[in-house]
Image: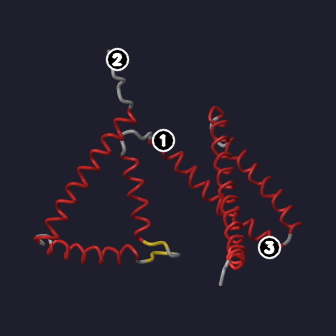
Amino acid sequence: MKQKKPKTRLERFLSQLILFCIAVMLIVSVLAFIQATLHPLDPVVSKAEVTLTILDKTLSSSLFSGVSLGTIVVILSILALSMAGRGVHRRQYMVSYWRGILSSGIFFLSDAFYRYVRSRGLLYYSASLALFIAVMLILVEIISRWGSASEERDRRTELLASIVSGLSFGLLVQAFEALFALAKEKVPDLLSRFSFF
């Protein structure tokens, strides 16, 4: 008789997740049916709506430069929950967290830089691009050597990966914008050609 292969950790997780979702759906369905027929939760629902409306107004209020309290609460909640997880290495998490911020910052700066210099002309763009790359590489070397020699290679690898991923994402955004502009221009022409009216 063939022995049954034990489930992998992924299979166990997925089966537990499916069972949990089925249980939640059953409970919600029963509660929704009871509420739809007997309306026992009407006072709770009306009170929850009032509370959520007040909470929504509070969280939507802008603190500075369009940043709402809700955005800060969501980010801090995700940060706290992920840090509290059992299967998370906190030191590695913080390194990846700052690397992600660096990557996003590089994307933001490179995108703004690209748009500004491109509007000034191709010669300015070529010269500024060379300067931009040189400054980035110099900054990577300064930060990489600013610490212990044993971690220099790892630090340089992380910084270069963050910079390249930020620049790559900026390139993808610009390519998507170019494709969207092209489609916006060409699709009406194609539709008018194939129109029977």
Residue on which the image places disc 2? 2
- Indicate which label's residue lies in the foreground, 3 or 2: 2
Answer with the quarter of the image where residue 152 lies.
top right
Which type of secondary structure does the marked residue at label 3 adopt? Answer: helix
Answer with the quarter of the image where residue 173 lies.
bottom right
Q: Considering the image in quadrants, where does the C terminus appear?
A: bottom right
Residue on which the image places disc 1? 91
Which type of secondary structure does the marked residue at label 2 adopt? Answer: loop
Q: Considering the image in quadrants, where does the N terminus appear?
A: top left
In the image, residue 31 sits, relative to residue 136, either above or below, namely below
> Would you say 58 lies left or right of 118 here?
left
> Would you say 11 lies left or right of 39 here?
right
Q: Where is residue 25 in the image (x, y as percent from the top left)?
A: 25, 55
- Pick whichever, 111 or 187, lies toward us: 187
- In this view, which residue lies farthest toward the top? 1
Q: Position of residue 62 (x, y in %)?
A: 45, 77
Instruction: Name the residue type under label 3.
Output: Ser
Q: How crowded is mark 3: few (under 14 residues within 10 Å), some or many (20 or more)?
A: few
Residue on which the image places disc 3? 119
Q: Position of residue 154 (x, y in %)?
A: 63, 37
> Would you say 191 lies left or right of 55 here?
right
Instruction: Name the residue type under label 2.
Output: Lys
The tag earlier along the polypeptide, 3 or 2, is 2
> Would you say 96 lies left or right of 16 here?
right
